[in-house]
Image (spheres, grey):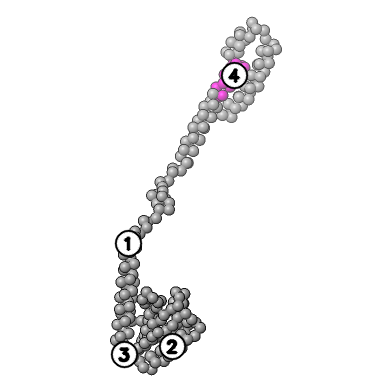
Amino acid sequence: MRQVRWGILGLATAAVAAAGGWSMWGATPEATPARAEAAEARPGSPADLTSEVRALRAELEALRRGHGHLLQRVESVGRPAPLPVPEEAAAPGTQAAAPTAQTLAAREVAREERRQELEAELQAAAHTEPRDREWAGQTETLVTRAFSGPDFAGSRLTRVDCRTRMCVLEVEHDAAEARAELLSSLMMVNGLQGQAVMRLADDGSRLASRIYLSRAGESLPMTLRP
C-alpha cells in the first residue's frame, strides 16, 4: 500500500506541477473555480491527487513524530541508571584515626616490660647454667681476640662469661655508630654463628651494651611470643 501511495505521490507531484502550469498559463480567472470544482468531483483529477498528496504528507508527518517518540523511549531505556556510590568510595583517602599520645605511651610501656622479661630469662640462664670448660674457654678467647681487630674499632670488651650454651658480653662504645655495627661485626667472626641479642646498658656517663650470644646451633633460652 505504501509503494502504491508513494507512486501516487510521485504522480501527484507531477500532476500538481502540471496543474500549476495550466492555471498560470491556460485558464482565465472566471473559469478557474468552476473547473476546480469540476476537477474535485472527478477521481484521478489534479484536485483529487492534491488531496491524496496532502493526506500522504499528513501521514508522513505523523510517522516522523512517532519515530521521534520511539527514539526518545529507546534512549531513555538504554541509558544506564547511575550506580549507587558506596560509602568507602564516597570518601576517598579516609583512614583510621591516628593513635593518641596515651596509646603510644602504653605501647612503649608494654614493649619495655617485654624486654625486661626477656632479659630476666637470659640472666637467669646465665647464672644457673653449668660451665662447659672446653667450649667456654675457647669461645672467650675467640671473642677477646676479635675485639682487638679493626672490625670492632670504637668498641671495647669489658667482660665475657661463657657457660654451656651461651655467653654474656659487656661492651663500651666510643659512639653510637660503633654500637650500631657491633652485632653485624660479631656475627662475621668465624665460630660465633649463633643467635645474638643486645641490650642497652648505659649508665648516663658512658655508652654500654650487654650482648647475649648463643652457641652455634643453639637457641637463646628465652620465651618467644607471637
Q: Earlier in the sequence, mark 1 or mark 4?
A: 4
Residue stretch in magenta = 42-57
Q: Residues within 10 Å of mark 3 (few under 14, many from 20)?
A: few
In the depicted structure, whether residue 11 falls above or below residue 190? above
Mark 4 or mark 2, whichever is nearer to me:
2
Q: Quadrant of the C terminus?
A: bottom left
Mark 1 or 2, nearer chain start: 1
- Label 4 crowding class (10 Å Cα cut-off): few <14, some 14-19, many 20+? some
On the picture, is 174 further left or further right than 48?
Answer: left
Q: Residue at the spot x=58%, y=17% of the render?
A: 48
Residue drawn at x 41%, y 80% is 172
Kindly identify which residue carries mark 2: 144
Q: SS at mark 4? A: helix
Q: Nearer the viewer, residue 8 or 73?
A: 73
Q: Quadrant of residue 203?
A: bottom left
Q: Quadrant of the N terminus?
A: top right
Q: Residue at x 45, y 81 (%)?
A: 155
* Tag 2 secondary structure: helix
Q: Nearer the viewer, mark 1 or mark 4?
A: 1
Expressed as whole percent of the image width and height from the top left, the position of residue 100 reads 34, 59
Give the Cα distance between marks 1 and 4: 94 Å
Task: Evaluate whether residue 118 shows in this view.
Answer: yes
| Direction front: furthest residue | 205
What is the chief secondary structure element of the magenta stretch? Answer: helix
Q: Amino acid at mark 4?
A: Thr
Q: Position of residue 36 (x, y in %)?
A: 61, 11
**Can you identify the residue that label 1 sits on?**
103
Is residue 180 visible from the viewing direction of this image? no
In the rendered structure, find residue 130 and report the number of the disc placed on it. Answer: 3
- Disc 1 element: helix
| Residue where numbered disc 4 is placed | 50
3 or 2: tag closer to the N-terminus: 3
